[in-house]
Image (cartoon, rainbow, N blue to C red):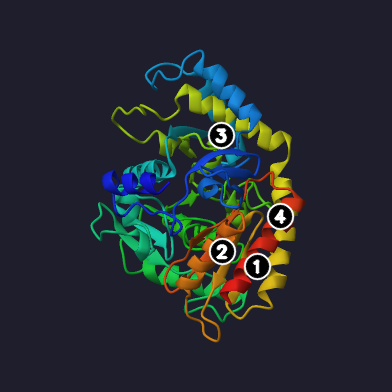
Amino acid sequence: MNDLFARHRQVLPDWLALYYDEPLEITHGEGRHVWDAEGNRYLDFFGGILTTMTAHALPEVTKAVTEQAGRIIHSSTLYLNRPMVELAERIAQLSGIPDARVFFTTSGTEANDTALLLATTYRRTNTILAMRNSYHGRSFSAVGITGNKGWSPTSLSPLQTLYVHGGVRTRGPFAELNDREFIAACVDDLRDLLGHTRPPAALIAEPIQGVGGFTSPPDGLYAEFRKVLQEQGILWIADEVQTGWGRTGEHFWGWQAHGQSGPPDILTFAKGIGNGMSIGGVVARSEIMNCLDSNSISTFGGTQITMAAGLANLSYLLEHDLQGNARRVGGLLIERLRAVAAQLPGVREVRGRGLMIGVELVKPGTDEADPKSASAVLEAARESGLLIGKGGGHNTSALRIAPPLSLTVAEAEEGAAILEQALRSAY
């Protein structure tokens, strides 16, 4: 293992993040568990960064990929592609966007890139509204709208980005307000911001901010934003890369918690739909999707083998009501963790919904972020057989918990017990 780590450091970038003091090599998985190269078994509460959505080595997905690989793996979008059309039909119907068109990419970063291209072309402006504490990918344009300094390596951008309040409920200048007052203050801030600039192309927002530590506004904030945006024809892009496909339990898409003013104009997705295969994409109203006036293709977006995986995975998700399971098991897990947090001075907040849970850590007796303890908890959990993630934005540190949506009650209890032990070891 040390040899592989040395080889990794020799040929891969220094900025390519690795977890753990002694990075592990995951060799195989089954259900909600994975094994490393030394034979250690772990309960997976992070799912390859929310990507293994249903289960590791799900037989239905494995079978679909194997059968498709035996026929044809790839032909590009220059030819008709039955699996791509079939998956696009299902996603268009599920999206809630009227007269929807779907374009497939290979990642969430590329999906958000495409959404920005569509919005700025449709609106003929390169000004974008984004949320503070946000993350939208690692490409040049996605970094340019990311409101999280730790994941933004350059200030150069093809876009002019203006950042809006509201993505973080319990920190910032409006934190002490009640939900109704918080929404009103954020709407007033948005109106004031729009009074100082030419009309932007779009607002892009994660319904629950992923890398930022699973933070979110009160339900309905983006619906109120949308009323203001529509006055000037500004588009709403919902970044559902982490919140889509029922992970939040209460809704199939994160935007539905803010749907009082209708669906978004553009929706981006990725991660869980492929259950590990590289699928991303954009859904938009036809006049927005069709606004480009030059040719384009997607060499690997929508390729047959990934589309076969997506179709099988989506079918399994719907047929087994994994959204309902995320709501039920996630609700139990959140309450269990909140009971633990009440006894620990270093846990500021347990937040989230469904199987998308953040545990924010602070130095006891203060409101200061505690990244050192977050790393210590990550290590202690791993030593006891549990894999979790971490994140956070400006002055915050949070643990990120996002297991496959088929998590059982027994596994939730097991993971919560390990995490409690790890938290107690740090505090």
User: Which marked residue is nearer to the observer: mark 1 or mark 3?
Assistant: 1
Please name the amino acid that badge 4 sits on. Answer: Ala
Label 4, secondary structure: give it: helix
Distance in Å between CA atoms under marks 2 and 1? 8 Å
CB contact under 8 Å: marks 2 and 3: no
Few, some or many residues within 10 Å of mark 1 (<14, 14–19, 20+): some
Name of the residue lying farthest toward the top: 71
The one nearer the camera, 409 or 154, is 409
The residue beneath circle 2 is 380
Label 2, secondary structure: give it: helix
Q: Mark 2 or mark 3: name the one nearer the start of the chain.
A: 3
Q: Mark 1 or mark 3: name the one nearer the start of the chain.
A: 3
Determine which of the numbered discs, if any, sits on residue 190 in the image: none
Asked whether the viewer can see residue 214, the reply is no
Q: Mark 2 or mark 4: name the one nearer the start of the chain.
A: 2
CB contact under 8 Å: marks 2 and 1: yes
The one nearer the camera, 1 or 159, is 1
Q: Which residue is drawn at 68% across and 78% down?
A: 343
